Amino acid sequence: MKYVITAALALTAAAAQAQSHVQIYGVVDAGVLAEYGTPAGNTTGIGSGLASGSRLGFKGSEDLGSGLSAVFVLEGGYHVDTGAMGQGGLIFGRQAFVGLRGTFGTVTVGRQYSPYYQAIRDVADPFEDGMAGQATNLMAGNYRMDNSVVYATPRVAGWSAEVAYGAGEETDKLAVNDARKRQFSGMLSYTQGPLLVMLAHHHREDALLPDHVRHTALAARYTLGDVMGHVAVADNRGLAAERSRDVLLGVTWKNGPHRVLLSAIARNDRSAAQRDARQLGAGYLYGLSPRTDLYAAYGHIDNDNGAAFTVGNATDSGNGNAAVNLGLRHIF
């Protein structure tokens, strides 16, 4: 009898393992960061997460039957140079969500990347929002949405969409604006062969004022052999109805272990202040293996009429108008 019980338990465990999957993953990234034109002059130090934010994550899924699966992600950032936690000390400050996936698409709830940010990172930016040349030095990122519900459709005939709502969950005691901190974000995507196009929008209510900011971006990426071209145009509306427009042109060249990144971004401030800015970025990565690479990058911003944009990297907004990155990244 005990052999029958043992065999039954073994079969049950094997079935559970076949239906559930949990993966531990992460990034370890560190390097030398030199900044120029900072309030303290030129500085050099060790930085963490220059190309990609260092992180430790857990993600998994469980087959619930009839084509339905439960999915989750818990991902926290950390600083390699000090061992401190990232994202202001949050345990899972990068992502934390749970949801269901099926033939209808995917619905997730928690702290998640906005659809707008994914359009900038995955399509527009050759630097994929990392290193000194990253697009979000000038362009809005709208990175993560707390208290959010996200729905992503299946891809049909090359088309897909994603919409997100982030509850502000902040009570206005003066009853001036009950919508404070709410966010809405969405993206419409089309892919056909080497072409990928995304139209994205993000709307965020201000935390203090009865006002909002919004961004709309059209981004495209086209692959031709070893070369990938990037282009994006974004229209921005800030507080007090301030308006600006961003234009990005970029190139990614891949050949064996070599990857070269180039981009140019221009911001046109359409207000009377005319605080325009222009950024040039260049990067090089050498793959030591599929999971480990060496990288070098340079970014420089020209600010006009008191504009104060700075050159940052994947985990830091930067302090000066130019920067050089030299680093090593390992993905596991």
Image (spheres, rainbow, N blue to C red):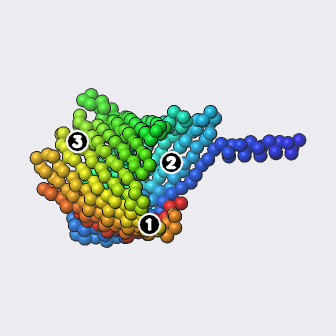
- 286 left or right of 241 in image: right
Pick whichever of labels 2 and 3 is earlier in the sequence.
2
* Circle 2: element type: strand
Which residue is located at x 27 percent, y 48 percent? 233
Residue 222, compared with residue 7, is above or below; it is below
Q: CA distance from mark 3 to mark 1?
A: 40 Å
Dot 2: few (<14), some (14–19), or many (≥20) neighbours within 10 Å?
many
User: Mark number for residue 237?
Assistant: 3
Residue 316 visible, this orientation? no
Q: Position of residue 28 (x, y in %)?
A: 47, 62
Q: Position of residue 218 (x, y in %)?
A: 31, 45
Q: Which residue is mark 1?
A: 255
Question: As shown in the figure, which amino acid type bears the numbered disc 1?
Answer: Asn
- Taking depth in this image into account, of 323 and 121 the one nearest to the observer is 121
- Taking depth in this image into account, of 312 and 197 the one nearest to the observer is 197
- Taking depth in this image into account, of 283 and 314 the one nearest to the observer is 283
User: Mark number for residue 74?
Assistant: 2
- In the image, farthest residue toward the right: 1
Which residue is located at x 58 percent, y 43 percent? 61
Based on the displayed image, in which of its 4 quarters is residue 40 positioned?
A: bottom left
Residue 216 visible, this orientation? yes
Q: Quadrant of the N terminus?
A: top right
- 303 left or right of 152 in image: left
